[in-house]
Amino acid sequence: MKYIVDTNIAIAMLAQRQQITQRLSGVPASELGLPVLVVAELLFGAHRSTRVQENVARVHALEARFPVLPVTRQVAEHYAVVRASLVGRGIAKGDLDLLIACTALDQGATLVTNDAALKDGTISHLVVEDWLS
């Protein structure tokens, strides 16, 4: 796995934003992973929308294109270490954001995100790219 996609990038994928479609054209589907927590956030958004069935179907289509990565025991271990380090330095981050970032760490992959809290360099060894900027 080369890239792990955060929720804001997955939303841009669903919206077929030109910057994202251009970047994806050079990335084999097998090299891009969707954390199951990203799928959960996308489905939540779909269920809160006015076009529930259409948006749920779009999320399912995205899931069919790319590997969906579970929260494993190893991801949980990364989360515990990273969160303890951050808390020890007085830094707070959202649990889902951390678990998504830890999925990237576990896979040895680059996290693709537009989230400033994940791009700020406070998570050791996390490699980040922003395909929207």
Image (tube, rainbow, N blue to C red):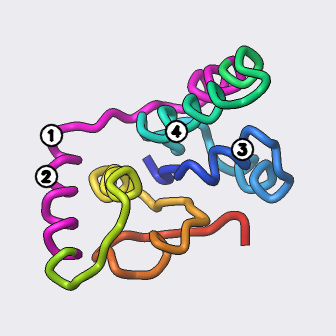
Question: How far apart are labels 1 and 3 at the CA level?
Answer: 28 Å
Q: What element does badge 2 sit on?
A: helix
- Is the residue under label 1 in contact with that under label 2 (CB below 8 Å)? yes
Left or right of 30? Residue 69 is: left
Q: Are marks 1 and 4 in contact (CB under 8 Å)?
A: no
Q: Nearer the viewer, mark 2 or mark 4?
A: 4
Task: Tell me the kind of residue under disc 3.
Answer: Met
Q: Amino acid at mark 4?
A: Glu
* Residues at circles 3 and 4 in contact by the CB criterion of under 8 Å: no
Dot 1 lies on which element? helix
- Type of the residue with mark 2: Glu
Instruction: Identify which amino acid the numbered label 1 is placed on.
Output: Arg
Q: CA distance from mark 3 to mark 4?
A: 14 Å
Crowd around label 3: few <14 · some 14–19 · many ≥20 (10 Å): some
Part of the protein shown in magenta: 57-86
- Along the viewing direction, whichever of 43 and 124 lies nearer the viewer: 43
In the image, which disc is placed on residue 81?
A: none
Q: What residue did someone put label 4 on?
A: 41
Q: Residues within 10 Å of mark 2 (few under 14, many from 20)?
A: few
- Residue situated furthest right in the rendering: 18
Q: Which residue is mark 3?
A: 13
Q: Position of residue 56 (x, y in %)?
A: 66, 21
Q: Which mark is residue 77?
A: 2
Q: Which residue is found at the position 23% from the left and 75% from the top?
A: 86
Q: Point out which mark residue 73 bears.
A: 1
- Is residue 106 within the magenta segment? no
Q: Quadrant of residue 59?
A: top right
